[in-house]
Image (tube, rainbow, N blue to C red):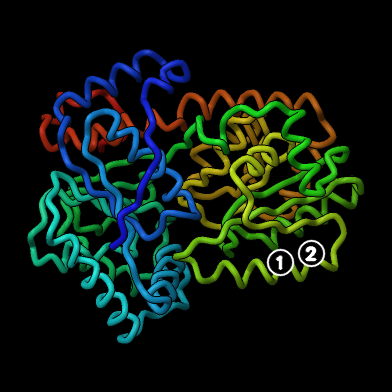
Amino acid sequence: MKKVKTTPKSIRSYKNLIPDELYGQILDLTKKLKGSRVIFINSTCKGGGVAEILQSEIPLLNDLGINAVWYNIEAEPEFWDVTKSIHNALQGNGRIVITKNMRKVFERFNALNTHDLKRESWDYLYIHDPQPVALPYFLDGEVDNAIWRCHIHVSRVNRQVWEYIKRYLGDYDSCVFSLKEFVPSDIPIKKRFIIPPAIDPLTPKNIKMDKMKARRVLDKMNIDTRRPIISQVSRFDPWKDPVGVIKAFEVAKQKLPDIQLVMAGSLASDDPEGERIYKELKAFSAKAKDIKILKGLSEEQVNALQTVSNVVVQKSIKEGFGLTVAEAMYKETPVIGGNVGGIKLQIIDGKNGFLVDNYMQCGKRMVDLLEDTQLRLGMGRMGKEVASKYFLLPRLIRDELLLFNKFSYSKENLVKSNILF
């Protein structure tokens, strides 16, 4: 395994962005946890929402007096091919079959990654997503206070693959999901928590950027800021429905010929599918008018794009949460999202954005927002309010502290929260 370094942060920096009550809860919940050692494990430190969250959460927990450390598992490309198939199967791809050879690859690299863990000690072992899920199993029962955090949309799983993954869950004390509807009824873990993800408002991606500066950033990227911009920022992944976004844009462009589409994506080391999809979209956009496909944007460039865009789209087919929805809302940019998973948790249809079921609806909503300035601005303001109240990092820190405290507090003594059920 590889230890991940993070940049120090201070919880005080967030005090003016959150209610006093929330700040007080964070400090109170930390009292019994000072000095506790929490090991976080996931698959990558770059690309994707989990890595972004941990880059901010780990240093804040350390600032609060908790000894939080972060490791990435290490593996060969064949492992990432297998885990991408597992990910797709758990999100509902029924065509995938996990073979004997795939199981061998998955188990071999999980077992290899326990070598470093066997020399470690912890109060809480916090494992994210399916890639490292088998680590406790290969620690031969030498595991206390293990937590499995599932970030993906698992409301309709591929049963064969789920039955395989489920065999490794018996070694966990607790599990965490983003939505209650994602918790499988047959999961063999009794302690279940609901903790939605959150964005860090003080990163270069989310800190407030002046619109003039944002336009200058986009000008350098050869994006025409004089014309309406529709954008989607996401991994290059079929579940994000990039083809559907392009089709919706083409519907809207029939009525509003001056509009342009920017699709910006990231490539994560644990996602071998991303490069192929990027190349396919790039080839398609070369033949299309007013469509840009970009990768490798800096956080400042993403901030500028979400700030200047007239409309942000997140037209996912499946979505565990969708941090880009909260990011755009926090910048007062209205969002059109797929009517699925974690997007439904963030968007109240017709209030702070629109939920859509197909590309025709999406195209129509693009037109509605671009033609009605008051509607667009009003939804943007409401989106900022929702993101600020529910989806900023300190709320996530509070909920994680509640999770850790459940090992030492009685259920009745927990600070009131909607995460325990």
Residue to which mark 2 is pinned: 285
Q: Is residue 418 visible?
A: no
Residue plotted at (38% across, 48% down): 181
- Compare residues 7 and 46 and report the one nearer the observer: 7
Q: Residue at x 67, y 49 (%)?
A: 232
Residue 326: name its quadrant.
top right
| Camera-nearest residue between 306 and 390 | 306
SS type, badge 1: helix
Q: Position of residue 342 (x, y in %)?
A: 48, 45
Q: How many marks?
A: 2
* Quadrant housing the N terminus: bottom left
Q: Are marks 1 and 2 in contact (CB under 8 Å)?
A: yes
* Amino acid identity at mark 1: Leu
Above or below, 320 against 138 in this view is: above
Circle 2 crowding by C-alpha within 10 Å: few under 14, some 14–19, many from 20: some
- The residue closer to the viewer here, 91 or 22, is 22
- Residue 198 image position (x, y, % from top left): 44, 37
Q: Residue at x 64, y 51 (%)?
A: 297
Residue 118 location, quadrant: bottom left
Which element carries disc 2, helix, strand or loop? helix
The circle drawn on residue 19 is none
For the residues marked 1 and 2, what is the alpha-carbon distance in whole angstroms?
Answer: 6 Å
Q: Which residue is mark 1?
A: 281
Q: Position of residue 272 (x, y in %)?
A: 51, 71
Horizontally, residue 391 falls left or right of residue 368, namely left
Residue 151 makes an appearance in the image: yes
Say left or right for 239 vs 247: left
Q: Is residue 126 left or right of residue 258?
A: left
The amino acid type found where label 2 is placed reads Ser
